[in-house]
Amino acid sequence: MDAFLACDWGTTNLRAWVVGADGKVTAKREFPLGVAKLAPGEAERRFKDEVRPALNAGDLPAILCGMIGSALGWTVVPYVDCPADLATLAKGLFRADDQSRIVPGLRGPGLGGFDVMRGEETQLFGWLALDPARNAGRHIVCHPGTHAKWALVEDGRVVRFVTAMTGELFDVLSRHGVLKSDAPPDDAAAFLTGVDAAGEGGELSARLFTARTRVVAGDLPARSATSYLSGLLIGSEIASLPRLLDVQRGETIALLGDETLCGWYAQALSHKGWRAETYDGDAAALAGLYALEQGGGA
């Protein structure tokens, strides 16, 4: 296999790796070029004028995943329907130009309509590729983030998934309105108090106001309110979403993504009696892009 450029291009940033013919990474960079910050048509130009030159990858074939394949990115790449395996995803690769292909996202039945993902599917299949034994049996994978994904994977296929806007809700609520706070969410005790306050995940809009009333009543220090809010939101998510995928208490939930954020989810899950294991999202994304570049097992 020839050397190639692998990119995970999301809403807030772009991570890129040059992968040699032997499969080893020879260069990597991160760019503050999230698609949400770019004007229409800007992604293609900046990829060619900035990203490729920065990695000395002007002539390399490239494979890109994430929101770059959305209406905010380079071009809209059609979703692949679930259930889908790696080979199915590979067949949906879209050629954006002579040197660049973009990974399609996944689409599946959701709450009241379709649910979609872009980027997480590459990490999911990369996670499977990192340990071939995972391609057998049933797995529950949670991908924390701005829009957290919970996926049911059976025998190497993503069968269905559910999205929770937990990260975006936290960002909006902690920056605006009566719950606004500049304090970092670093109080583990307040976080777990919030996890408990989430109950079974219902009545969230009413429970959110307790992030204010507990401070007003003197039960919670003002600087800990952000941690409590984080616990409340994540607690509501982990109380309700596993039920939607029929997750049983004996099953282990794989947490895939950013180490710090996965750590908070792991604390919340353990506190509520769930078993969880954490895996690096960047390593999984790179493994997924590598597997797709190899042909997706087709």
Image (spheres, rainbow, N blue to C red):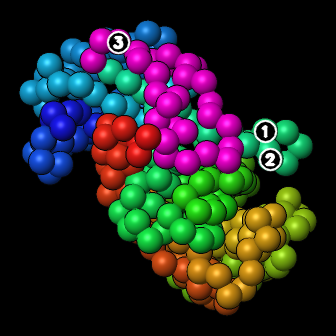
State the mark number for residue 110: 2
Quadrant housing the C terminus: top left
Left or right of 178 on screen, residue 105:
left
Q: Could you tell me the amino acid type at mark 2?
A: Gly
Indicate whether 55 appears above or below 220.
above
Q: Could you tell me the amino acid type at mark 3?
A: Asp
In front: 284, or 290?
290
Q: Please name the residue shown 49% across and 42% down the image.
A: 87
Q: Could you tell me the amino acid type at mark 1?
A: Phe
**The residue stretch that appears in magenta:** 71-99
Q: Which residue is mark 3?
A: 97
State the mark number for residue 114: 1
Q: Please name the residue shown 38% across and 24% down the image.
A: 101
Q: Please name the residue shown 55% across and 48% down the image.
A: 85
Q: CA distance from mark 3 to mark 1?
A: 29 Å
Q: Are marks 2 and 1 in contact (CB under 8 Å)?
A: yes
First along the sequence among labels 3 and 2: 3
Local secondary structure at mark 3? loop
